[in-house]
């Protein structure tokens, strides 16, 4: 599920997606892409391509309708069997969102570039600025996302003993700060496993020993549900769990921003 920079050339037919993004500057990812990207890569934007419009509930980054997302992938020639390589420059924060969405809908899961764009450059990669011309294909027929819960599904899972994982930084989990959402704190009963613990400071995925230390005895829980602020960085933790054999873990896609929307006065 991971690929090192020097191995990209071993997949000459792969579709490469640049998923760079910054939550505080929605245009920075596309600007970075235009300034230089891995040769042949197309750009997918978190807000425009990997999310639906924000509504009253559903969180800050609702999942797009499955067939809408399938049509997005088809614009770039991606069907369910296509080999895809995805990268960002944020310790898998956005590439893992694409990985989860594709896997959940029955596509061949993308390979994620270990260490992201910076690691690729530091390994001798030479960027290009040309935007490749896409060869579209017919959109795959997809059902609904799997391994997903909404707020009702979350409550049902908790009622039968699921372990809930909050993927945000410790200060947000503890309610000491909340720079984005209207309410600070965490969902009752959740434990904290910040998503940044999956990778080292340079963005490369930790060795299995360190990942198991990141999770501790949570790996022994019968059922796992993972959330973050809006269902994006939780996918880094879900990617780690899949690497460790817990690929059945569920995503609460609306996450804290959805939970908060039900706490507001009528």
Image: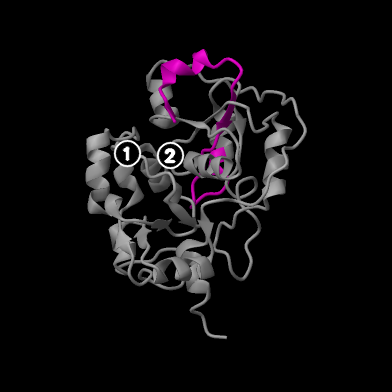
Quarter residue 119 falls in: top left
Tell me: residue 260, above or below residue 172. Answer: below
* Residue 157 appears in the rendering: yes
User: Which label number is shown at residue 199?
Assistant: 1
Label 1 element class = loop
Q: Is 212 within the magenta?
A: no
Q: Residue furthest bottom?
A: 266
Tell me: residue 11, above or below residue 179. Answer: above
Q: Quadrant of the N terminus?
A: top left
Q: Nearer the viewer, residue 233 or 224?
A: 224
Task: Report which residue position mark 2 lands on.
Answer: 92
Residue at position x 53%, y 56% in the image: 148
Q: Residue furthest right?
A: 138
Quarter residue 91 falls in: top left
Residue at position x 29%, y 68% in the image: 176
Q: Earlier in the sequence, mark 1 or mark 2?
A: 2
* Residue 233 appears in the rendering: no
Where's residue 197, x and y in %?
29, 45
Does the residue at mark 1 contact the one at mark 2 (Cβ under 8 Å)? Answer: yes
* Distance CA(mark 1)–CA(mark 2): 8 Å
Where's residue 56, x and y in %?
61, 71
Q: Is 21 within the magenta?
A: yes
- Which segment did they paint magenta? 1-29
Where's residue 182, x and y in %?
46, 72
Where's residue 101, x and y in %?
56, 45
The crowd level at tag 1 (other Cα within 10 Å; few <14, some 14-19, many 20+) is many
Q: Quadrant of the C terminus?
A: bottom right
């Amino acid at each position: 599920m991971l690929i090192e920079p020097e191995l990209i050339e071993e997949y000459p037919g792969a579709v490469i997606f640049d998923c760079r993004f910054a939550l505080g500057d929605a245009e920075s990812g596309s600007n970075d892409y235009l300034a230089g990207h891995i040769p042949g890569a197309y750009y997918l934007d978190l807000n425009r391509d990997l999310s639906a419009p924000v509504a009253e509930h559903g969180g800050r980054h609702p999942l797009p309708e499955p067939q809408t997302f399938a049509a997005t992938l088809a614009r770039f020639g991606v069907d369910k069997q296509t080999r895809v390589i995805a990268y960002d420059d944020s310790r898998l924060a956005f590439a893992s969102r694409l990985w989860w969405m594709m896997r959940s809908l029955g596509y061949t899961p993308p390979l994620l570039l270990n260490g992201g764009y910076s690691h690729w450059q530091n390994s001798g990669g030479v960027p290009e600025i040309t935007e490749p011309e896409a060869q579209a294909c017919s959109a795959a027929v997809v059902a609904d996302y799997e391994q997903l819960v909404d707020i009702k599904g979350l409550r049902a899972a908790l009622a039968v003993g699921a372990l809930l994982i909050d993927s945000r930084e410790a200060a947000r989990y503890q309610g000491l700060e909340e720079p984005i959402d209207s309410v600070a704190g965490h969902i009752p009963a959740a434990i904290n496993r910040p998503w940044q613990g999956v990778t080292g400071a340079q963005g490369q995925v930790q060795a299995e020993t360190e990942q198991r230390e990141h999770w501790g005895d949570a790996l022994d829980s019968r059922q796992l549900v993972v959330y973050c602020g809006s269902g994006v960085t939780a996918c880094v933790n879900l990617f780690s769990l899949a690497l460790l054999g817990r690929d059945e873990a569920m995503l609460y896609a609306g996450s804290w921003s959805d939970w908060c929307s039900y706490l507001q006065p009528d």
